[in-house]
Amino acid sequence: QEAIESAEQFKAICTEHGVKLLHSECIVGWRHRVCGRFDILADVGGKTTLIDIKTNAKFPEEYLRLQLSTYALAVNETLGIKVDALAAIWLPKKRKAKWVDIDAYKMPVVLSMVNDYAISNAESETVLPY
């Protein structure tokens, strides 16, 4: 029953925001330093929007800001698509689903963080923790 309610809330949020799917569940990467799979890339009101779906009890906004900003860099590199906006669809159990706009880090900040992380982990095969 919870899964059905979550699916209905997800559909309602997508309809409310006019989400038009472009890609989903694509693996993207950036210069062999970042690799991951995003949930949704969509046209939302004329903006190419990278959307993550979260079901956590507590909404991880700062984590998502880093994750989606990094994925935006990788989407551009892998798919050749510039991401205009970031968002999340939060589907917490037993609570109403919510659309959350996420403020992206500026690209120089993302590049610096990715490069710093890669340098500090050059000896291992560790990747960013998402």
Image: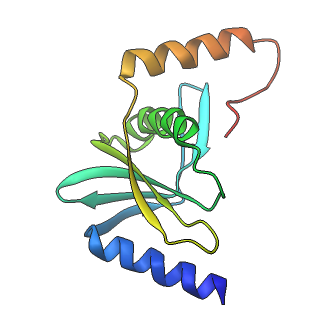
- Residue 129 appears at what percent x and percent y? 70, 35
Looking at this view, name the residue that lies furthest to the left.
46
Q: Which is more toward the observer, 14 or 122?
A: 14
Q: Is residue 59 above or below residue 42?
A: above
Using the rendered view, name the quadrant where residue 106 is placed.
top left
Q: Nearer the viewer, residue 33 or 12?
A: 12
Q: Residue at position x 47%, y 17% from top?
A: 111
Judge whether 121 appears above or below 69 on screen: above
| Colour basis | rainbow
Question: For the point 43% across and 32% down, which residue is it?
Answer: 73
Residue 54 in the figure: left or right of residue 9: right
Q: Is residue 21 above or below residue 81?
A: below
Image quadrant in which the N terminus is located: bottom right
At x 34%, y 40%, the residue is 80
Outermost residue on the right side: it is: 124
Q: Position of residue 121 (x, y in %)?
A: 75, 15
Q: Position of residue 11 (x, y in %)?
A: 41, 79
Say which quarter of the image contains residue 98: bottom left
The residue shown at (31%, 44%) is: 85
Would you say 1 lies left or right of 10 here?
right
Above or below residue 7? Residue 65 is above
